[in-house]
Image (cartoon, rainbow, N blue to C red):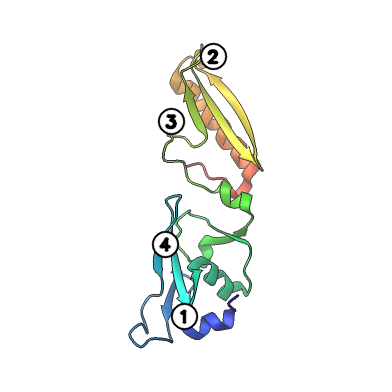
Amino acid sequence: MITKEEVLEVLDYDPLSGIFTWIAGSAKLLGYEAGTLLKCQSNCTYIRIGINDSRYLAHRLAWLVTYGYLPEFIDHIDNVGTNNAISNLRETTHHGNMFNRAMPINNTVGVKGITYREDSITPRYVARVGLHGERISKSFNIEMYGSKENALEEATLWVDTTRKQLHGDFARHE
């Protein structure tokens, strides 16, 4: 495990921009921005920095340099994995990190947590919010609300309100 002191021997960290710059090591790297882009399976991008034959995620180094310890999970508030400004990082749990996920790319409704079901006797929107492995859901029957637009509006209001109640500051609606 790397220490704050070891990081600061080779890197300078700007907490406002979140950028690390080399201050020691190979002469050709001095003064240059540290790190390479790392693409992950879920279509996210992080910055990875190599120090002493080990690789570290830049947001974890930013936290270590700023606070002196490494929590198990760190969340990017704006969901941009390359934005390592300390104001964009917060300590969290696995669940808190999952709450802040972006809308899946296969969402056809355009609202996170809502699907449209046409395969039943009565077409409806189904709104779902997850918490600790369990899902809370509610159906919004098109006929009951008079139109698809009204049903979607009510489903959106419900899912946003429920998500905020359950996920608090980690609620992400888009």
Residues packed near mark 2 inside 10 Å, few (<14), some (14 to 19) or many (20 plus):
few
Question: Which residue corresponds to the image point at 60% horizontal and 50% vertical from the top-left?
Answer: 169
Tell me which corner region of the image, top left, top right, bottom left or bottom right, holds residue 163: top right
In whole angstroms, how far apart are the C-alphas of marks 3 and 2? 19 Å
Disc 3 crowd, CA 10 A, few/some/many (<14, 14-19, 20+): few
Q: Which mark is residue 12?
A: 1
Residue type (three-letter) at the residue carrying disc 4: Leu
Q: Mark 1 Cα within 10 Å, few/some/many (few <14, many 20+)?
A: some
Q: Amino acid at mark 3?
A: Val
Residue at disc 4, secondary structure: strand
Query: Is 131 in front, or is 43?
Result: 43
Which comes sooner in the sequence, label 1 or label 2?
1
Q: Which disc, if any, is residue 168?
A: none
Q: Secondary structure at mark 2?
A: helix
- The image position of residue 88, as x and y in percent, is 51, 61
Name the residue that disc number 2 marks: 144
Between discs 4 and 1, the one toward the N terminus: 1
Picture coordinates of residue 49 (x, y %)?
A: 45, 72
Which residue in the structure is indicated by mark 4? 38
CA distance separating discs 1 and 2: 60 Å
Q: Secondary structure at mark 3?
A: loop
76, 87: nearer the viewer: 76
Q: Position of residue 113 (x, y in %)?
A: 52, 35
Foreground label between 1 and 2: 1
Rendered residue at 54%/14% (across/down): 144
